[in-house]
Every structure is written in C-alpha cells, then in structure tokens.
Amino acid sequence: MTSTVRTQVAIVGAGPAGLILSHLLAQSGIESVILDRRSREEIESTIRAGILEQDTVDLLASIPGSRAHTVGSRHDGIELRFDGVGHRIDFAGLVSRSVWLYPQHEALKDLLAARLAAGQDIRFRATAHAVEDIDSERPRIVARDDAGAELDVEADFVVGADGSRSVVRSALSGSHAGYFREYPFGWFGILTEAPPSADELIYSNSPDGFALISQRSETVQRMYFQCDPHMDADSMNDQQIWETLDRRVPGVELKKGPIFQKGVVPFRSFVARDLQRGRIAIVGDAAHTVPPTGAKGMNLAVADVVVLARALEALLGRSDSGPIDSFADEARKRIWKAQHFSWWMTSMLHQIPDASEYDRLRQLGELRSVVDSEHGRAYLAEAYTGWPMDLGAAIGSAAPASSAADLLTRRAS
Ligand code: PHB
C-alpha cells in the first residue's frame, strides 16, 4: 500500500535549513511537509558547531520560543594566536557586528518545538529514496515511512535540505557533480566538563599544528586540534589529548576536566554544480560543504534558505518565476565567498604536511599582515560575523511591522 500526501513544498531534511525554510514559507501562507530519516531525538543530539552569524541569530530569535538570546552568548571578538602571542579581532569595534555562541543542537530543539507547535507536518524516520517526475510541474518524493510503508509526497516544489549525502542532489544532477577540495588533515574534537579557559574563542597557529578553544557553557567546553583525518579518536587517552592541546596553545593555561565526548571530523570543501532545476532545489550541506574553521556551515545554510523562501513565495504565491530562475546565481555569490573565507582561515591557521620552512614563514607573514592592519582585521571581522542577508525582505514581508522594528532595536542594543 502506497500512501500519497500532497503539499505545496516537500522538504527533505529536518535540519536547520529545512526547519527554517518551513517557518519562512508558513509566514507567507505556503504549506510544506518535511521528511527526515532520523528520529526527533537523533536530530536533537547531533553535535555540530556553535557559532551563529549576526543575521542568523536575528532570524532564529524572531521565531517564537527561541532561546538563542537567553541560553546563547554574544561574542564581540575572537583571538588569533601565533608565535605564542594572542591578537584580538574586535568585531564590534571594527564592523559593529557580533556573533553568538549557541550550539546547533540547541537551535534545533527550539526550531523543532516551534514548528511542531505551529502544526508543521514533519515525518520523522521517513527515508526519501528518489525524486520522480523531476521536470514536471508536480515533482514527487518516493519515500518509506517509519513503519516501512511506501510514502509518496507530491508537491509544487521539492527542496533537498538533506545533508552531504543528499538524495535530492542525486536526482538533480548526479551525486558527485560539483567542485571538490580535500585537505590532508581534520579536527580532533572534544567536549570536557570544565570552566571556560578564555572569554572568547582562541584560534591558535602553533608549529605543532592548529588548535581551537571554544565553549559551550560555564561548565562544558569544546576544543579541537588539527589531526590526521584517518586517525581513530580512541587511540588517544585524556592525558595525551591535554598534552597536545597545551603544546598547541602556548601561553594560555587551559582549564581541564573529564573528557566525555571525542571524535574526528575530516575536512572537505564542496560546491554542487547545479543548485536548482525546474521545480527542485538544494540548500545547506546538500549544496555545499566547508571546513569548519570559519564556522560558516549552518550560517550558509540559513542564507540559502532566506533567498529560496523569497523565490518560492514569488513562484507559488504570485506565479512569478523570476526569483527562482535567479536563485542559483544569487545563492552562489555568497557560497563562493564563504568557500573562500573557510579555505583562507583553514590554510592560514593549519600546518600543511610537507610545508617547507619558506611556506611556514610566509604563513606567519600572512597572519601578521592581517593582525597588523585595520583593513585586514576588518575583512576577517566582516566575513566572520557574516555578510548581510537581507532579512527585512525575508521576514518583513509577512511579519507584522513591529517584529522588523524589534530586530533593528535588538541589533542596535
Ligand atoms: C564550535 O564551537 O564547535 C566551533 C566554533 C568555531 C568554529 C568551529 C567550531 O570555527
């Protein structure tokens, strides 16, 4: 028995991109159905990065029930460390913008609760296998529901927000069609029960390799260090991990505690060749991947969705196909800026295996030319806090005027 569901927009993936898209569409009176192969608990416990750009946090905070501004914390700068000395990049002073540290899984809990409270149709443990009728006006997702029964979702538009192994991307253009870059290293990440070692994030370039000191709360800290992407996280004990981190952040006394989670993240850069075809589009990790050094992953997904929501509102609300025809070109501008920034932060801060002494000294020259120049620091600050997303158009068109004003007041405060 196949059950068929009809909706305006079928979204594969209940991560930040899919959930925020459904919210923006609902604000424009457009109905959607979301499928995700994971359970709600699995989605809420996926550990990912925690830095939200200024516009990302403004958008999240405009969604009822968001704890981004209460549980999250504002960061007005970061520290770049090299040659044993720290250099502050003062975001607030340089570009009058900030970022917020708010773990992605907490943002997901807020988003799922808000969407379910609003009556959003979310099918958990429903696995999409294929997209059919892709060049028609009614594309269709072929899926299996949580009981293993066949489920077809017929829609006016299909969106793949289904991560790096996207089924929708395969339907669009073949799963590997795109531009790739591999890196000969990854990050070893830990969560430790300890107080913060610093007020702001520390990005440290040391002769021994890169390390990042990040945070989660007053009692839990997140730290990473550059490693072989193929290494087994269990091959290092706590003492070896702390010795590595201490060597990589010289001059900072790291507060240590029990390590209760560890894992290795490989680094890749990827941009899919095609982002849209007819009535199908892909967003977020389905469309692109960045190494985590610039914390752009989730922010880029949100930016895609802001552009796509506007295009779908025009297409489905006013039969205007102009914005969807230019969606890919519009999204690509920011995607490639973020690709560059993430690659640049990565290559400037990590030790590249087999680098010569020349390469190493040039890299220090590069870091110095950033921190010694107000323009260099301002470029980093502008990119890190995020290029403007034109949220007024995305939120303001459907939201009461007071909420747009509220966003402006919040930004100014
Ligand atoms: C994190 O806290 O997980 C984090 C922060 C900054 C990054 C990457 C990850 O650049």
Image (cartoon, rainbow, N blue to C red):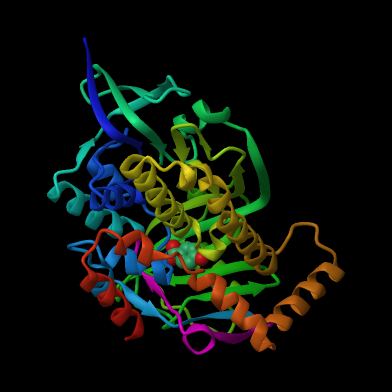
Q: Is residue 170 above or below residue 180?
A: above
Provide the residue span drawn in magenta: 82-103
Q: Quadrant of the C terminus?
A: bottom left
- The quarter holding residue 399 reads bottom left
Residue placed most toward the observer, 409 or 377: 409
Residue 14 shows in the view: no
Residue 358: x and y, percent? 86, 70
Residue 118: x and y, percent? 14, 49
Residue 112: x and y, percent? 22, 50
Which residue appears at 33% of the width and 27% of the height?
127
Q: Quadrant of the N terminus?
A: top left
Which residue appears at 52% of the width and 55% of the height?
236
Q: Is residue 61 above or below residue 375?
A: above
112 vs 239, left or right, is left
Query: Within the magenta stretch, is there residue 394?
Result: no
Q: Is residue 358 above or below residue 271?
A: below
Residue placed most toward the observer, 138 or 352: 138
Residue 341: x and y, percent? 62, 64
Residue 30 shows in the view: yes
Residue placed most toward the observer, 61 or 361: 61
37 vs 54, left or right, is left
Which residue appears at 45% of the width and 64% of the height?
389
- The quarter holding residue 335 reads bottom right
Counting the numbered discs, the total is 0
- The quarter holding residue 333 reads bottom right
Which residue appears at 60% of the width and 75% of the height?
380
